[in-house]
Amino acid sequence: MNKKLLATIGPSSLNKEVIQLMELNGVNLLRINLSHTKINDLKNIIESIKLWSSVPICLDSEGAQIRNQDMINESVVFTKGDHVDIYFAHPYSSWERGINENTNGLIRQYFPKGTDFNKVTNSQIEFVMKRLNTRPRKTRGGKQPVELFLGKAVDLLTA
């Protein structure tokens, strides 16, 4: 059985360097989550990705609902013999999502509960995203998320 690597493309990963790095690291299928993509932008997004990479693209209208507990089988078949294992946390089992829960707590340091995100600017979100992605993580041997993703260290003094 050949295992396939699927990567979800979001606004922050939609650039030539990241797409080509994904392909270089063995991604076999790029997934565009339609719940986070403006339909009017979809044609340009697909055309850009095709210019940057030869990896096939799929569209997903379900988004995060793929973790649905009603799934009978925890793998999805792309073609005969090719499988993708899907791992999902059980509802109300925060201990199964340690890094996710920790990151939510870090985000809450910048945007407390009750924050009106209609009043939050893109530059504020970019600032927090950059701070969190360049913050060393104990669970990752002191490495930064961006360092693990890109495979190179980022200078914290300029981040």
Image (tube, rainbow, N blue to C red):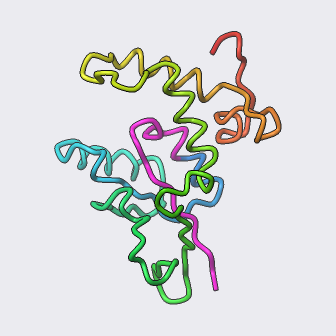
**Given the current orientation, which residue lies at the most extreme top position?**
157
Q: How many marks?
A: 0
Closer-to-camera residue (1/46): 1
Residue 63 rendering spot, x and y as whole percentages: 35, 57
Q: Which residues are magenta?
A: 1-19
Q: Is residue 67 above or below residue 99?
A: below
Q: Is residue 110 above or below residue 38?
A: above
**Given the current orientation, which residue lies at the most extreme left position?**
40
Locate residue 104 relative to residue 136 in the image: left or right: left
The magenta stretch spans residue 16: yes
Q: Residue placed at 48% from the left, 61% from the top?
A: 55
Locate residue 47 relative to residue 91 in the image: left or right: left
Residue 96 rendering spot, x and y as whole percentages: 61, 56
Residue 62, quarter of picture = bottom left
Dividing the image into 4 quarters, which one contains the N terminus?
A: bottom right
Q: Residue placed at 51% from the left, 78% from the top?
A: 75
Dividing the image into 4 quarters, which one contains the C terminus?
A: top right
Closer-to-camera residue (145/54): 145
**Given the current orientation, which residue lies at the most extreme bottom position?**
80
Q: Residue placed at 59% from the left, 26% from the top?
A: 132
Residue 149 rendering spot, x and y as whole percentages: 65, 42
Q: Is residue 116 above or below residue 143?
A: above
Residue 60 rendering spot, x and y as whole percentages: 32, 61
Q: Is residue 88 above or below residue 100?
A: below
Residue 102, quarter of picture = top right
Q: Residue placed at 27% from the left, 60% from the top?
A: 61
Residue 45, quarter of picture = top left
**Given the current orientation, which residue lies at the most extreme right position?**
141
The magenta stretch spans residue 102: no
